[in-house]
Image (cartoon, rainbow, N blue to C red):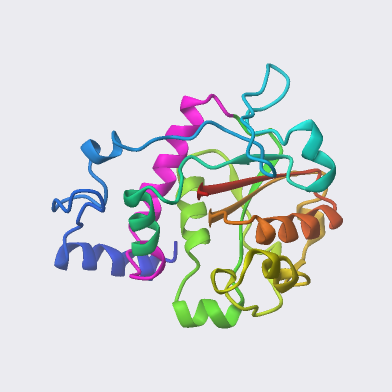
């Protein structure tokens, strides 16, 4: 995170103490008691949603055999259902109310989930946050996926690459569209740059929420075409 933004966040935390997204108690963005109420979803196939427990040689969340021909996503990790009220509230507060400190809470929830299900990324993995178009990022002031990725990278040994995938089209927000319109809306919206940085590597593509998966799939197609070996997708919720 930018040092100036970090300093600003610390000042805001002093002026406006964190409030728990679950119970409203002052002091934390998400208290320990409310964390215990969360229901974690076991890893499942990105395309069909079938549970994917994995084996010694196949990671949990691996796209199932019948779906592999239909998606570039190798494996999918997403701990929570978006309809869980505290999860939705946390993501909303980060994304729209600019409560930047929540990115660290969400990263910690991800780390705990990975530990619980014994999920380990390949050694050559790199972390790539899903980019916003530069115009939208200027308007919002930040990219929530990048903040979560940076917090995750700080707490793990995985390297983050913020400059290998860019958004070239300022498309309509996917939330405004019907499911069948989302795929067409996102085609051609991304480009890979510095392909030498991702060639033959496993890319961990991170976003906040998966809905239909069209955005993640389009980004994955672009990264695969640029030489990435495998694409894992991670979201906080789905």
Was residue 115 drawn as part of the magenta stretch in this picture? yes
Disc count in the image? 0
Location of residue 95 with respect to 201 vertically, above or below: below
Residue at figure coordinates x 70%, y 78% from the top left = 169
Report the side of 223 relative to 137 (left or right).
right
Report the side of 128 relative to 153 (left or right).
right
Was residue 18 drawn as part of the magenta stretch in this picture? no
Q: Quadrant where the N terminus lies?
A: bottom left
Q: Farthest residue toward the top?
A: 56
Percent across and percent down for residue 36 are 29, 33
Residue at figure coordinates x 22%, y 67% from the top left = 11
Residues 190 and 165: in front is 190
Q: Which residues are magenta?
A: 94-119
Location of residue 223 with respect to 43 vertically, above or below: below
Percent across and percent down for residue 53 are 62, 24
Residue at figure coordinates x 78%, y 63% from the top left = 194
Location of residue 56 with respect to 145 vertically, above or below: above
Residues 47 and 204: in front is 47
Q: Main secondary structure of the magenta part?
A: helix
Q: Quadrant of residue 122?
A: top right
Residue at figure coordinates x 33%, y 63% from the top left = 93
Residues 216 and 135: in front is 216
């Amino acid at each position: 995170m930018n040092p100036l933004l970090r300093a600003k966040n610390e000042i805001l935390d002093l002026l406006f103490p964190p409030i728990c997204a679950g119970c409203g108690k002052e002091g934390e963005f998400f208290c320990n008691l409310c964390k215990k109420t969360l229901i974690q979803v076991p890893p499942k196939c990105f395309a069909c949603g079938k549970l994917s427990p994995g084996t010694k040689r196949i990671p949990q969340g691996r796209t199932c055999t019948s779906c592999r021909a239909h998606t570039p996503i190798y494996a999918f990790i997403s701990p929570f259902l978006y309809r869980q009220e505290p999860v939705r509230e946390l993501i909303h507060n980060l994304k729209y109310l600019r409560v930047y400190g929540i990115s660290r809470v969400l990263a910690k929830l991800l780390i705990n989930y990975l530990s619980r299900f014994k999920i380990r990324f390949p050694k050559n993995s790199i972390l790539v946050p899903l980019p916003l178009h530069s115009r939208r990022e200027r308007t919002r002031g930040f990219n929530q996926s990048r903040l979560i990725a940076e917090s995750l990278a700080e707490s793990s040994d995985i390297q983050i690459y913020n400059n290998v995938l860019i958004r070239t089209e300022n498309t309509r927000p996917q939330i405004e569209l019907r499911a069948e319109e989302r795929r067409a809306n996102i085609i051609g919206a991304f480009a890979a740059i510095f392909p030498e940085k991702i060639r033959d590597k496993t890319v961990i593509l991170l976003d906040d929420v998966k809905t239909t998966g069209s955005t993640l799939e389009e980004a994955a197609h672009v990264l695969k075409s640029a030489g990435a070996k495998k694409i894992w997708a991670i979201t906080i919720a789905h």
